[in-house]
Image (cartoon, helix red, strand yellow):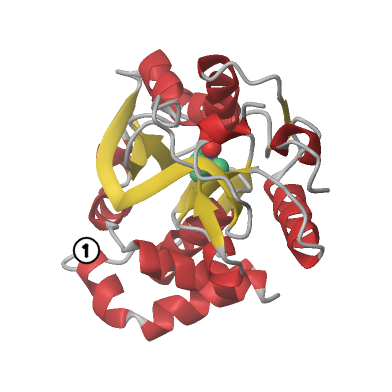
């Protein structure tokens, strides 16, 4: 297909994830910013990584909405496309957000959530194992057991509780499956009766703002979820970053001979 343009090779399609994801919204922004005649196809994180894996097996062209931390960078040789117009923003933090009143109602959980902080490499280790086929719960259990040095900092000086119910909402993004299961395991070890509720992105923000859920550890800021953050500002308690140096953007296999979103233009 040496005669085909990049756009033709890609069927003028950016392989997206769930429609509610910030990275999909940013990809639609990029289509506008760069004047691309591409469609951002929405599906799910799992469908995106399957499409990526299939394309790489056949050395075909593909461009996906990507982010890190993510196991795909350990599994495949990938690169971000440069984004000179800044459609995808800069470096991101992942923040923990509590419902209003959590600090009074569940001071122990609040303290742990406030202390929760880990590195991109920690999250990626958890993600890689989950992708290898182990259950998120089992991998989280293992990570917590093997990282008592880190976990003990989060629980330092916090008294255990006796079966208090707590709910954490999350979206089924690989990164958030990892983080939510890990903090859920830590809270459970501290005596909480933990429920993890999987929802879509918009409903996740609405749930923490309305108090339907107690907390989320999945707030990508300032860009990716900036619209949700602004919509509900004042209706939640921002506990700050649990991870720094995250990123979103358009990602392609390293063998593709393009380096910038601008190279998608025919
Ligand atoms: N993500 C992973 C999410 C946030 C976490 C980058 C796919 C998104 O809203 O795009």
Mark 1 is surrounded, within 10 Å at the Cα level, by few (under 14), some (14 to 19) or many (20 or more) other residues, namely: some
Q: Is residue 87 left or right of residue 31?
A: left
Percent from the top left, x then y, of residue 35?
59, 16
Q: Nearer the viewer, residue 135 or 86?
A: 86
Q: Is residue 15 left or right of residue 160?
A: right
Q: Is residue 125 left or right of residue 58?
A: left
Q: Nearer the viewer, residue 160 or 3?
A: 3
Q: Is residue 52 left or right of residue 115?
A: right
- Residue lying farthest left? 157
Does residue 114 lie above or below 15 as drawn? below
Q: Is residue 220 visible?
A: yes
- Residue lying farthest bottom? 146
Which residue is at a point 47% across and 73% down the rendered structure image? 125
Q: Is residue 194 visible?
A: no
Residue that label 1 marks? 158
Q: Nearer the viewer, residue 125 or 75?
A: 75
Element on which disc 1 rests: loop
Which residue is at a point 81% across and 34% down the rendered structure image? 11
Percent from the top left, x then y, of residue 102?
32, 38
Which residue is at a point 37% across and 17% down the rendered structure image? 230
Percent from the top left, x then y, of residue 62?
71, 47
Cβ(mark 1) to ligand 1 < 8 Å? no
């Amino acid at each position: 297909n040496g005669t085909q343009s990049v756009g033709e090779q890609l069927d003028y399609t950016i392989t997206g994830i769930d429609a509610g994801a910030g990275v999909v919204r940013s990809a639609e922004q990029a289509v506008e910013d760069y004047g691309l005649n591409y469609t951002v196809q929405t599906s799910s994180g799992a469908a995106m990584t399957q499409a990526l894996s299939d394309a790489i097996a056949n050395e075909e062209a593909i461009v996906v909405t990507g982010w890190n931390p993510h196991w795909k960078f350990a599994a495949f040789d990938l690169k971000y496309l440069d984004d000179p117009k800044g459609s995808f923003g800069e470096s991101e933090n992942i923040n923990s957000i509590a419902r209003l009143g959590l600090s009074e109602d569940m001071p122990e959980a609040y303290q742990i959530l406030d202390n929760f902080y880990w590195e991109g490499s920690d999250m990626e280790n958890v993600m890689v194992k989950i992708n290898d086929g182990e259950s998120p719960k089992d991998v989280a259990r293992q990570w917590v057991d093997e990282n008592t040095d880190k976990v003990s900092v989060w629980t330092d000086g916090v008294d255990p509780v006796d079966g208090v119910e707590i709910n954490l909402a999350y979206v089924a993004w690989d990164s958030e499956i990892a983080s939510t299961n890990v903090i859920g395991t830590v809270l459970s070890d501290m005596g909480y009766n933990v429920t993890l509720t999987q929802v879509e992105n918009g409903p996740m923000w609405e749930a923490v703002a309305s108090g339907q859920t107690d907390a989320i550890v999945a707030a990508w800021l300032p860009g990716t979820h900036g619209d949700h953050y602004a919509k509900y500002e004042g209706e939640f308690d921002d506990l700050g970053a649990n991870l720094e140096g995250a990123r979103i953007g358009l990602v392609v296999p390293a063998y593709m001979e393009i380096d910038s979103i601008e190279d998608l233009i025919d």
